[in-house]
Image (cartoon, rainbow, N blue to C red):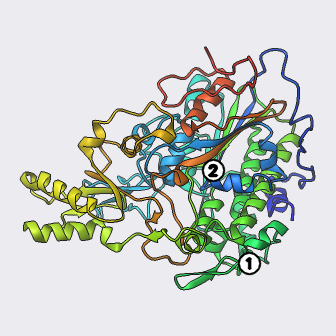
C-alpha cells in the first residue's frame, strides 16, 4: 500500500490528485546534481520534520530498507549521530530544542511535567504545554498554550525579520506543534483524541476549511474498522510474540476496531493524517509561493506511540518504519508536483530502546524495571518518619525531586542531604545532584557524547522549575515499574540510547555527504537560518556547513 492513508486522505483533505511519483533513486538528478556555480537562492519553504522517538539506533536499523521519502533524504546531508544532549530526554524538552537552537536550560522546558508548588492543585503538577493560570486547568485536562516556552523559535525569528513570512505547525501532539511552532504561528493544529484542534486562545477563530475537511475525513476513517496492514518481507523475522505484563504483542499489523481512537493514535494512520493536513495547509495557504520564505513544522508522533505501546523491535515498529517512509515520500512527491522550492530538515525529539522483557531475551539480561521504592513520595515518607517531620516531605515526577514547601525552612537542608544519601544508596541510581551542584556547573563545550552526567543535568536545569534534587537511574533501568497496555517501553534517561537521534537536511540539487561525528539538535535552527540569510545570535547551537567542498553555507 503506497503511503498508508496519504493518497486517499490527501485527496479528501486537500482536493489534490493521489500520489503517483516513484521514489527518487540513487544517482538521479535530484540526488547527485552538480554544485551551483554561485550562491543559491533562498528556499521558498522550510519543512522541519520531527519524528517522535526516531532514535539513531532505529534509523541505523532501517536506513537500508527505506525506498521512498527517507531514502530521498539520505541523498542530502546526513548526520547519523545527532544529539538531544540534555538529561531529560522527553518529548517536550526535545521538541523545544529543534527550532529554537537552545537547550532546555534556556527554553525553560525541562520535562513533560514538573512540580510548581505555587499552583493550587493537590498534586502540584504542571504540564509543559498548558497555561496553569487558566480557570479549571490541570496537567491532564488543560488548555494547550505556549505559555511556558521562554524563547523564540526559528519561525518567530523569521516573522520578526519579515512579517510577510507565514509559519504553520501541524503535529500528532500539542507539545510537538507548540514547541516547534513557537509564539507567532499563523496556524497551529494538533491531534486531540479524535480530531485536530488548535490553541485555546484561538478556539473562537473560524476553523479553516482544510482542517474541517481533515477532521471529517479522519472521522470517517475512525468510524470504520482497519484491516491488517501489509507486512514487508524483511519484517517477518521480527514477528515473534512476547508477553509483557498481561498482554502478548510483537506480531501485530495494526488491525483496529471501528471507533478505537487509541489504537488509531498508536499506528501509522496518525502520521498519514498529520502529513495530509500539512499538505493541505501548504496548498490552501499557498506556502512557498510568496515573496518571503515560509516555514511549516511537522510533528510525526506515531513512532513514539507505537514504541510506547508495542516496543521498537517487533513487527509493529517494522511496519511503522515502512509506512512512515512511504508517507513522507508521498508528501514530498506532492510538493514536487506543485513545483515548490523547499528545504527539509528531519530529526527527532529523543531516542529510546526496546522494552525490558524483549531486551532480556536478546542478550541483555541486565535490563530491569525501576523499583517502586524509588518514588519520591515513598522516600520522603521514610525520611519524615525517621526525622519526625510531618509529610509530605518529598514530591516529584521521575528524575526531578522537590522538597515539599511544608517542610520547615530550618530543616530543608537536612531533608535534602538525607534524600541524596538515600538515593545514592539505591542500587538502581547512578547519580543524585542537588540544585546547587547543577547550577554551579558550567555548560559543556565538549562534544555531547563526552559530557559528564552532571553536564547533561546542567543542560536540563532551570532554577525556577527544576527540582531540588535530580535523580538519574543507571543505564538500562526503565522508569516503567509495571508495564500496561499502551505503555511497555519509554525513554527520558541521560544515556545515549535516549539522546542520539539522526539529523538530515535535503534540498533538490543539494550535493550530499555524511558526517558521522556528533552534532546537536540545537544546531538545526542556526543552520536553517543561514540558508535563508537570517542573522541569529546568542543560541546554544552552531551553524552546520552543508557544502561538502570548499564552499561554506554558514555566515563568516
Residue placed under numbered mark 2 in the picture: 56
Q: Position of residue 277 (x, y in %)?
A: 72, 53
Between discs 1 and 2, the one toward the N terminus: 2
Q: Which mark is residue 126?
A: none
Q: Position of residue 386 (x, y in %)?
A: 10, 69
Q: Position of residue 86 (x, y in %)?
A: 45, 44
Q: Residue furthest bottom?
A: 246
Q: Which mark is residue 255?
A: 1
User: Which quarter of the rendered picture does the C terminus lie within?
Assistant: top right
Answer with left or right where residue 511 lies relative to residue 303. Answer: right
Quarter location, residue 18: bottom right
Answer with left or right where residue 271 lies relative to residue 407. Answer: right
Q: Nearer the viewer, mark 1 or mark 2?
A: 2
Residue at image location 70% in from the left, 70% down from the top: 316
Q: Position of residue 340 (x, y in %)?
A: 82, 35
For residue 394, above or below residue 296: below
Quarter location, residue 520: top right
For residue 369, above or below residue 109: below
Amino acid at each position: 500500500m503506497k503511503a498508508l492513508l496519504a493518497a486517499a486522505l490527501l485527496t479528501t483533505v486537500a482536493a489534490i490528485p493521489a500520489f503517483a511519483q516513484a521514489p527518487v533513486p540513487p544517482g538521479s538528478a535530484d540526488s547527485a546534481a552538480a554544485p551551483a556555480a554561485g550562491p543559491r537562492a533562498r528556499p521558498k519553504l522550510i519543512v522541519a520534520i520531527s519524528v517522535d522517538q526516531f532514535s539513531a539506533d532505529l534509523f541505523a536499523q532501517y536506513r537500508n530498507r527505506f525506498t521512498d521519502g527517507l531514502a530521498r533524504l539520505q541523498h542530502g546531508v546526513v548526520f547519523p549521530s545527532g544529539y538531544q544532549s540534555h538529561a531529560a530526554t522527553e518529548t517536550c524538552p526535545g521538541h523545544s530544542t529543534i527550532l529554537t537552537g537552545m537547550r532546555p536550560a534556556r527554553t525553560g522546558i525541562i520535562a513533560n511535567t514538573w512540580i510548581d508548588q505555587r499552583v493550587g492543585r493537590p498534586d502540584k503538577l504542571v504540564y509543559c504545554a498548558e497555561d496553569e493560570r487558566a480557570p479549571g486547568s490541570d496537567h491532564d485536562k488543560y488548555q494547550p498554550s505556549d505559555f511556558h516556552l521562554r524563547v523564540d523559535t526559528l519561525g518567530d525569528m523569521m516573522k520578526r525579520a519579515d512579517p510577510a513570512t507565514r509559519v504553520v505547525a501541524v503535529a500528532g501532539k500539542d507539545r510537538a506543534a507548540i514547541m516547534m511552532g513557537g509564539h507567532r504561528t499563523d496556524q497551529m493544529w494538533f491531534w486531540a483524541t479524535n480530531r485536530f484542534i488548535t490553541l485555546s486562545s484561538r478556539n473562537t477563530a473560524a476553523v479553516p476549511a482544510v482542517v474541517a475537511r481533515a477532521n471529517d475525513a479522519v472521522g470517517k476513517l475512525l468510524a470504520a474498522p482497519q484491516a491488517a496492514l501489509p507486512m514487508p518481507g524483511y519484517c517477518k523475522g521480527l514477528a515473534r510474540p512476547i508477553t509483557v505484563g498481561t498482554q502478548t504483542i510483537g506480531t501485530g499489523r495494526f488491525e483496529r476496531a471501528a471507533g478505537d481512537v487509541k489504537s488509531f493514535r498508536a499506528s501509522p494512520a496518525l502520521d498519514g493524517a498529520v502529513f495530509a493536513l500539512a499538505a493541505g495547509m501548504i496548498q490552501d495557504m499557498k506556502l512557498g509561493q510568496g515573496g518571503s520564505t515560509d516555514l511549516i513544522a511537522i510533528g510525526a508522533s506515531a513512532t513514539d506511540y507505537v514504541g510506547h505501546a508495542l516496543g521498537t523491535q517487533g513487527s509493529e515498529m517494522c511496519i511503522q518504519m515502512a509506512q512512515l517512509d512511504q508517507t513522507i515520500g508521498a508528501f514530498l512527491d506532492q510538493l514536487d508536483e506543485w513545483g515548490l522550492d523547499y528545504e527539509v530538515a528531519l530529526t527527532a525529539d529523543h531516542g529510546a530502546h526496546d522494552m525490558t522483557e524483549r531486551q532480556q531475551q536478546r542478550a541483555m539480561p541486565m535490563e530491569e524495571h525501576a523499583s517502586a521504592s524509588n518514588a519520591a513520595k515513598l522516600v520522603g515518607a521514610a525520611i519524615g518518619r525517621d526525622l519526625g517531620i510531618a509529610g509530605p516531605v518529598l514530591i516529584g515526577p521521575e528524575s526531578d525531586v522537590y522538597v515539599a514547601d511544608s517542610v520547615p525552612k530550618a530543616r530543608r537542608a537536612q531533608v535534602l542531604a538525607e534524600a541524596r544519601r538515600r538515593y545514592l544508596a539505591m542500587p538502581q541510581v547512578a547519580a543524585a545532584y542537588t540544585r546547587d551542584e547543577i547550577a554551579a556547573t558550567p555548560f559543556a563545550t565538549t562534544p555531547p557524547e563526552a559530557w559528564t552526567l552532571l553536564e547533561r543535568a546542567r543542560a536540563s536545569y532551570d532554577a525556577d522549575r527544576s527540582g531540588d534534587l535530580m535523580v538519574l537511574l543507571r543505564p538500562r533501568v526503565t522508569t516503567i515499574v509495571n508495564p500496561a497496555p499502551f505503555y511497555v517501553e519509554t525513554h527520558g534517561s541521560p544515556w545515549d540510547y535516549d539522546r542520539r537521534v539522526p539529523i538530515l537536511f535535503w534540498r533538490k540539487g543539494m550535493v550530499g555527504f555524511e558526517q558521522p561525528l556528533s552534532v546537536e539538535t540545537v544546531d538545526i535552527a542556526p543552520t536553517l537560518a543561514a540558508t535563508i540569510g537570517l542573522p541569529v545570535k546568542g543560541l546554544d547551537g552552531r551553524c552546520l556547513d552543508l557544502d561538502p567542498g570548499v564552499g561554506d553555507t554558514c555566515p563568516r
